[in-house]
Image: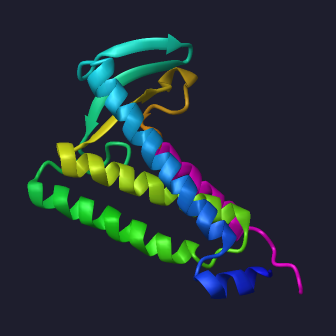
Amino acid sequence: MTEAAEASSTGVTRWGWRAYALAAVVLILDQLTKYWILSVVRLPEGATMEVFPPLQFTRIWNEGVSFGLFQAQHDLVRWGMVAFNVVVAVLLSYWVRSQVRLLPAVGLGLLIGGAIGNAIDRARFGAVVDFIDVHRLGFFPWIFNIADAGITIGVIFILLDSLRRERPA
């Protein structure tokens, strides 16, 4: 069955289904690691736990939009950011349905899972739980989480795909 025939029968391409599965994996890993850092390790806010150089865990609450930028401590902004993340995830979910190439499908799956993971944190806690700290590498000073990594890598994949030259049919 061709990609077009498959998409017309279900409305979703095979890459679209794989992107949805990837989004679910990112979301589950994100929420499990946040639960682990908060409820199992119980790392206090601002405390650091050495893992292995250059990785350490430093738990912080990110009330900002991205990497702690544009701090938003007002409830209206908090719920606006939750709504924005959900709307973005829904729009990306429609976009991924028609994907026929691997790179954008993977990128969109990573973005969807990350957006939902951070939206859940904002709804539950009023801020996003960040704890992965690799500042010792010398070029990445921010503390982040699995959802943030998914979003960042997803954007990179989509940008890389946009540089790809179309081949004539």
Residue 47 on image: x %, y %:
29, 16
Q: Residue at x 70, y 66 (%)?
A: 161
Magenta-colored stretch includes residue 17: no
Magenta-colored stretch includes residue 160: yes
Q: Is residue 110 visible?
A: no
Q: Quadrant of the C terminus?
A: bottom right
State the residue in front, 32 or 75.
32
Q: Is residue 52 above or below residue 137?
A: above
Give the overall secondary structure of the magenta segment. helix
- Horizontally, residue 94 falls left or right of residue 18, namely left
Q: Residue at x 61, y 55 (%)?
A: 156
Q: Quadrant of the N terminus?
A: bottom right
Q: How is the image coloured?
A: rainbow
Residue 43 on image: x %, y %:
29, 18
The image quadrant of residue 106 is bottom right
Q: Residue at x 20, y 46 (%)?
A: 124
- Horizontally, residue 80 falls left or right of residue 155, namely left
Q: Is residue 91 above or below residue 156?
A: below
Highlighted magenta segment, given as a residue range: 147-169
